[in-house]
Amino acid sequence: MQTMTSPEVQAHPAHDFLPLNGTDYVEFYVGNAKQAAYYYQATFGYELVAYAGPETGLRDRASYVLQQGKIRLVLTTSLLVDSDITRHVAQHGDGVKVMALWVDDARKSYEETTKRGARSAFEPYTIRDEHGEVTLAGIYTYGETIHTFVERSQYSGPFMPGFVAKTSALPQGAPVGLLHVDHCVGNVGWGEMNQWVKFYEDVMGFKLLLTFDDDDISTEYSALMSKVVSNGNGYVKFPINEPAEGKKKSQIEEYLDYYHSPGVQHIAIATNDIRSTVTELRRRGVEFLSVPATYYDDLLDRIGAIDEDLESIKALNLLVDRDEEGYLLQIFTKPVEDRPTVFYEIIQRKGAKSFGKGNFKALFEAIEREQALRGNL
């Protein structure tokens, strides 16, 4: 299965020592994988495609693999009272443990990154079954998050060895038009953003794309800073946020308070028809942040003509922004856990390569309203 996130880019730059083909999968450690899998099927329209657990000889955990478009989510829960998975969930709640990257050579990817200073999570190894073989290797990034390098060119099974094909016996909704991972955003602690930008530059060969300071991302009460790094071919993009000084607690501080370490804050998922996607997600009960109606009063004056009808944009509470390449439409869910940690962004790009800078103030004011309801502003 191809998992490229930028189909308009065709080749790896010749100087790229860590060529990446895209996001292979995102793995969550969760308290109850069966119920989490049902949630993602029923609301976001994912299809259950593979499973590993006691029935397949795996005694310590159960994992469900969900797929829609080029997106794969792996939901893993521990079956033991004392394990790394159990401890991870106790500390962080349900959260992203692995951002897996699809590569042509996992061993070389591991060697190139560890010799540049990456901390090893696990050394390369190969697993096999009747469908072929997959080679895996892992390095740590911020917090307890891992990048797993996945080499699967010689594999034709449903996910990887150890998993069996599985379909759901539960009623589930049809896909909602989710295509691929656009970017994954990490939250790090005070003064740590530049350290992790340097990690991605020096260790993984990424380039700095954009910088947002506290003048760009601030409201009356709180602020944050962010930098966006991208790999050489543009398939993988990681914005990295840190708190900035403000009158009250920022959303990044709230995340760190509840996640208890740096970690993945949100996953942005692309669609070709955001109005259809969001309409269906709302119908299925997904909750989104909302901006005041006044946001739309001068929207077309601010961003210019768009293909979509303004009233439909307003009715769905979508945000719109423009850069020199075109425009984008985006919207953000409320946290999908009880802890105010992980959430999703739904994004449709109409040429724009940016991240919605013009929407930052409205977005973060919306987040602050939710923080205030939780008593955390």
Image (cartoon, grey):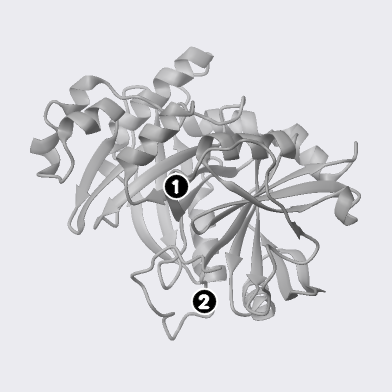
Please name whichever residue, 145 or 273, is drawn nearer the observer in this view of the structure: 273
**Alpha-carbon span between mark 2 and mark 1:** 22 Å
Q: Is residue 22 shown above or below 167?
A: below
Residue 342 % position (x, y)? 56, 36
Say which residue appears at 35% left-offset and 60% top-offset.
209
Residue 267 rendering spot, x and y as whole percentages: 50, 46
Q: Which quarter of the figure has residue 297?
A: top left
Instruction: Judge depth for marks 2 and 1 and give the one in front.
Output: 1
Q: Are marks 2 and 1 in contact (CB under 8 Å)?
A: no
Q: Residue furthest bottom?
A: 14
Q: Nearer the viewer, residue 151 or 117?
A: 151
Query: For the N terminus, which image quadrant?
Result: bottom right
What residue type is disc 2 on? Pro
Which quadrant would residue 42 be assigned to in this image? top right
Q: Position of residue 82 (x, y in %)?
A: 90, 39
Q: Residue 374 vs residue 227: left or right?
A: right
Whether residue 104 sits left or right of residue 183 in the image: it is right
Q: Going by the image, does 359 lie left or right of 130?
A: left
Amino acid type assigned to the residue bearing label 1 in the image: Ala
Residue picked out by circle 1: 268
Residue 347 against residue 57 in the figure, above or below: above
Residue found at x 50% / y 62%: 198
Residue at image position (54%, 76%) is 18
Q: Which residue is mark 2?
A: 19
Sort mark 2 into few (<14), some (14-19) or many (20+) by Cα contacts within 10 Å. Answer: many
Residue located at (32% from left, 46% from top) = 273
Q: Secondary structure at mark 2?
A: loop
Q: Is residue 88 visible?
A: yes
